[in-house]
Amino acid sequence: MRIMTASPTKTQQQLSSVELSALAQDIKRWALEMGFDDVGITDTELSEHEARLNSWVAKGMHGEMDYMHKHGTKRTRPEELVEGTKRIISVRMDYAPKDVKQAQEILEHSSVGYISRYALGRDYHKVLRNRLKHLAKKIGDHVGDFGYRVFTDSAPVLEKALAEKSGLGWIGKHSNLLHSKTGSWFFLGELYVDIALPIDQPATNHCGTCTNCIDLCPTQAIVGPYQVDARRCISYLTIELRGSIPEEFRPLIGNRIYGCDDCQIVCPWNKFAQTTKEDDFTPRTHLKDRDLIELFHWDEATFLKNTEGSAIRRIGYQAWVRNIAVSLGNLPPCSTVISELEQKKQQSNISDMALEHIDWAIEQHRRH
């Protein structure tokens, strides 16, 4: 077994169509035995999705996410990203906590910091990557030498398009992947391989006439069916954006301090969401639905300690302070909140970017 190269392997030359079909079935069985919740196989043809991506980028809807286009066509042409790629094995892992259907109630408690449900447990990148490596090893143990690469939202990979083509679900109007039996609360991962496995049928779209996600998006970021303007999206503003959050969106963010789940919460298909079976995705008590002021008290050392092994850590302490300051500014006028904001300003390592949002929050309380 080896990391992918351009040279064909003996595996590709020797396996018959019957053997390849049997191998595909084995791979799916192994994946499920390893804890994945679904698996599908597709080819590398993504020309339709490439056209959509190029149009989206041309409109500037990617915001400051330069990585969406800086790799050229490698994102939409897997064989250019990894030479020799013939098939992509896509996998899904459910992450919904037991009380995911009560997420809306947390949003209505304005003094509680809402963190997107996917980020409450261990960093999914590590979980899926390690499991995909085990799957690759299992394939190698069975067929011998073959080329592969593992991806979990860690490279220019059009994962939702690949998952849709492999039958794991359809891309909904909110741009998330949906499945009629499991909703959308799940992670995706990919294994690029140089084995010409038989492919699965693409999923069909079942959004119908529903526009819940479009109508109820807090910032109206879903500017049309299947079109999300990242520059308006709360997930982008609180996670991807490194600078100042535009003032027009701050009041609309409410108490969402890391990401946003609204389009998933209101989606009718999520009544079928499956509770995760993975212990690593169990929400951590020091992150889940904590008081905003309590979270605002964290200094950088506490932030790093409490987000160790979490996807949240990647935004850094200054963005964490920025996000919570905005949510504090959205609370009803309160002298205690003003006091907390003023005290934070005295912390020596607060950046100018974070300070600007703290000042904004103070102004919101004083003007009312």
Image: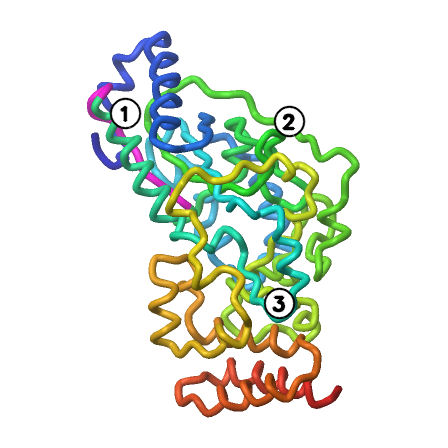
Residue 159 seen by the camera = no
Reply above or below: 15 against 43: above
Reply above or below: 20 against 298: above
Instruction: Report the residue marked by disc 2.
Output: 204
Figure quadrant of the C terminus: bottom right
Question: What span is in magenta?
Answer: 142-152
Q: Amino acid at mark 2?
A: Thr
Q: Amino acid at mark 3?
A: Asn
* Marker disc for residue 255: 3
Instruction: Report the residue marked by disc 1.
Output: 139
Q: Residue at x 62, y 46 (%)?
A: 101
Q: Amino acid at mark 1?
A: Ile
Q: Residue at x 37, y 28 (%)?
A: 31
Reply above or below: 368 against 146: below
Where does residue 270 sit, x and y in percent of width and height? 63, 39
Residue 352: in magenta span: no
